[in-house]
Amino acid sequence: MATAIKRPVQHDDRLSLTEHLDELRSRLIVCAIALLASFGFTFWQNEAILGLVNKPLEQTQNLKGEKASQDPLEQNARFQVRTGDAFTDQVAFFAQQRTFFADQAAAAEAGAERERLLRLSRAAGEAERSTRAAAQAEPANKERQPVTLGVAEPFTTTITVALYAALLIALPIILFQLYAFILPAFAPGERKIALPLMALVPFLFVGGVSFGYFVVLPRAIGFLQNFNDDDFDILIQAKDYYRFAVLFIGSIGLLFQIPIVVIAIVRLRILTPKQLRKNRGYVLLALSVLAAVVTPTPDPVTMLLATIPLYILFEASILLAAWLNRVAPPGTWWGEQDEEDAAVAYHHED
């Protein structure tokens, strides 16, 4: 059991079933510790994480713009904002009126006119104080926030979002443990290709998640939330919104694994780079369908935003696969034949 931790397993090592299970358990324990440590951090910073996830939703709310939403709830929020601005402006106006009447009363002779000016100054002062109190009572948080319906939903939803964030943070460690467990099954030649491909997975996934969060998700939410908004009181339940956001950006992160799939297909000699180039039209159609499924909006701009980077990744994958074929022909790293025969056979096939 200790051997799996002290020394990495080599390709030519012969381990019993019990030793394999011991190594698997050791690596699962490391993954669990990494996930728990990440979860402790994300739960501690849960407000910041919820703020990040809520930001695309807040960006869909336009309380002061000309093209504001017709959602009745958002119209009410817009009214509150503009009422607060009006109260703030009136505070300055009443302060000026109070000062003006006080100055006029000081300059007037004693009598009825002076008393009238003093009453006006006091009335303006009262109006100033009440208007200032109304302006200060304006809600500080006017952004759109998800709503919760159950007693325990705020707690359970926070736990769920923190767990998703912890999984993303712990992903490199989890993948490292996975690679360390399965890499001994590869021959040394196979490992030269398999290891770089596996190392690309987390970087591509994080790149896809970032692209989905910063570029595609705000546009998708904006379209969906403003669709027929004048016919609905749009309340967004927290658990549904977070599930949608996680699945949305997670799906885009998975779609960014296209280079791994393309290179694996070429290295397995299922298809060649030349064949992939000839059929790029079908690939573009397939990528468009995938983007349409991942971005469930009829908005063509959102679908294009998801399709274009996928197609760029596909073209870059072909170039990378062709370069790998020149450096090391496919047959050499699977041990099927020697380098010269593999190169001749592959170029003949291409």
Image (cartoon, rainbow, N blue to C red):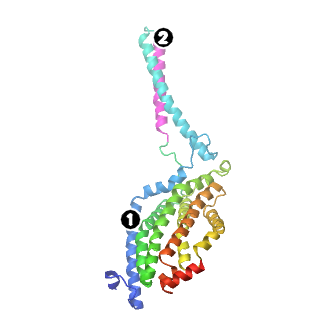
Residue under pointer 2 = 113
- Residue 76 appears anywhere in the view: yes
Proximity of marks 1 and 2: CB atoms separated by less than 8 Å: no
Determine the CA span between mark 1 and mark 2.
Answer: 72 Å
Residue under pointer 1 = 40
Q: Quadrant of residue 249?
A: bottom right
In the depicted view, which residue is nearer to us: 317 or 116? 317
Helix, strand or loop at mark 2:
helix
Q: Residue at x 55, y 76 (%)?
A: 266
Query: Of helix, strand and loop, which mostly describes the magenta segment?
Result: helix
Q: Residue at x 45, y 67 (%)?
A: 167
Mark 1 or mark 2: which is in front?
1
Q: Residue at x 39, y 78 (%)?
A: 27
Query: Which amino acid lies under the numbered mark 1 shown in the image of this protein?
Result: Gly
* 129 part of magenta stretch: yes
In the depicted view, which residue is nearer to us: 142 or 331? 331
Residue 49 lies, in percent from the top left, at 45, 57
Q: Give the crowd class for mark 1: few <14, some 14-19, many >=20 residues within 10 Å.
A: some
Helix, strand or loop at mark 1:
helix
Query: Which amino acid lies under the numbered mark 2 shown in the image of this protein?
Result: Glu
Residue 141 lies, in percent from the top left, at 49, 46
Residue 46 lies, in percent from the top left, at 43, 58
Q: Which residue is drawn at 56% across and 61% down?
A: 309
- Range drawn in magenta: 114-138
Decide: is 304 above or below 121: below
